[in-house]
Image: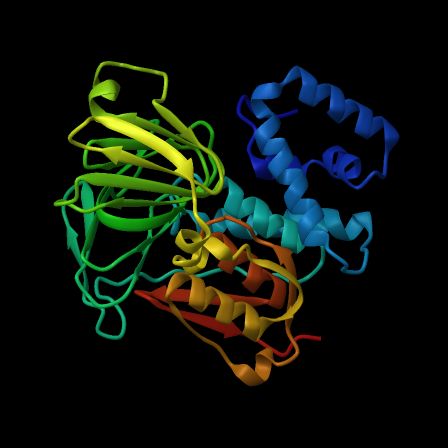
Amino acid sequence: MFSKYPQVEDFIENLSFRKAVFGQDDAAVQYWAKWAAENPQHRENAEEAKQILLSIQGSLPAITQQQVDASVHVLLQRIDRKKQNALPRHIGTWRAAAAAVFLLGIGAAVWQLKTSETGHSGRQAILFKEDIWETVINDGRGHQLVLLPDGSSAVLKQHSILRFPKKFETHVREVTLTGESFFEVAKDSQWPFIVQANGLITHVVGTSFTVQAYPGDAEVKVSVKTGKVMLYQQRDSLKGSTQPECVLVPNQQAVFQRAQKKIVGSELQKAEVQAVPIFTEYFEFKRTPIAQVFKTLEQAYGVTISFDEELAATCTLTASLGDVPLLEKLTAITLSVGATFQIQGNSIEILLQQKCL
């Protein structure tokens, strides 16, 4: 039925799985409950697919199974034609979010992506191209959006540097950070995501968190918004240690004391959470005007979004976008209103084709 490693979109494409999620077939419900018990290693992707289907459905009108099947087929064809020119790997969650929006009949679109080597509005984000690695330096006055090869996103704070491969070609997605950045990692349990910063290794498979690691600081701080984060000291990793020194869950943080070689975990204080706008935003929308949705993204990511206000006047969004990376959020949103989007530095342009019904 599935490949050896079924991804989120594989579940969404499956008619029996959709019937089980929506309670349309008792036999399907029983089958998938048994399947989940027998395949615990794939339960995470199955649960994510289920949550996407249920959350995106919201209070929208029901559509027929025939419409669902046709929509999934058309959307996946469009994605397959476009993905070779966009994200080379790890686009499972992006495809799943797009498929969920489309199959529920809210619209259809394909997205376009442009990247540039300069920042926006004088932010002076500089991109140096090397043979293997990309280096982004934010020496401007504001935050800089960085799109990673796997579809993950990072919001790089001023006086910070992020280095990453042009393509994640091994079985690990590894970046190095000097300074501070908020990460939203595309979920992929087969390809762990690692941030190396001042002797601390942060290991995740798909979550959102902040790493603060300035060169002269005595401490490295990691704060978690969603998901689970595992922390190792670099010396432990080199020795082949498989047990993390500290495991964090949402609303927790850890401080790595560099001189003492010690990691100390604690709960995030309210003031610390409120100091990072994106930490307090969970991107839950229910028939929300699309202009307000864009404003929410602008405030959370420090970007500028332009769109035709007249065409957008009647557009609304019902979706739970949670901690998925910005590219996935934009894909789901533009699919819902039949639009495309382009990104250039910290500027995002939404290209609406017509007014929403």
Position of 226 with respect to 239 (left or right) is right
Position of 140 with respect to 241 (left or right) is left
Q: Is residue 193 above or below residue 72?
A: above
Q: Is residue 251 above or below residue 120?
A: above
Position of 326 with respect to 71 (left or right) is left
Quadrant containing the N terminus is: top right
Relative image position of residue 197 (x, y in whole percent): 22, 38
Q: Residue at x 58, y 32 (%)?
A: 45
Residue 354, quarter of picture: bottom right
Relative image position of residue 229 (x, y in whole percent): 41, 33
Relative image position of residue 317 (x, y in whole percent): 64, 65
Quadrant containing the C terminus is: bottom right
Q: Which of 138 and 349 is in front in this view?
A: 138
Q: In this view, does 350 lie above or below 276?
A: below
Position of 314 with respect to 254 (left or right) is right
The coloring applied to the image is: rainbow
Q: Which of 171 and 260 is in front in this view?
A: 260
Q: Residue at x 68, y 50 (%)?
A: 55
Relative image position of residue 48 (x, y in whole percent): 60, 38
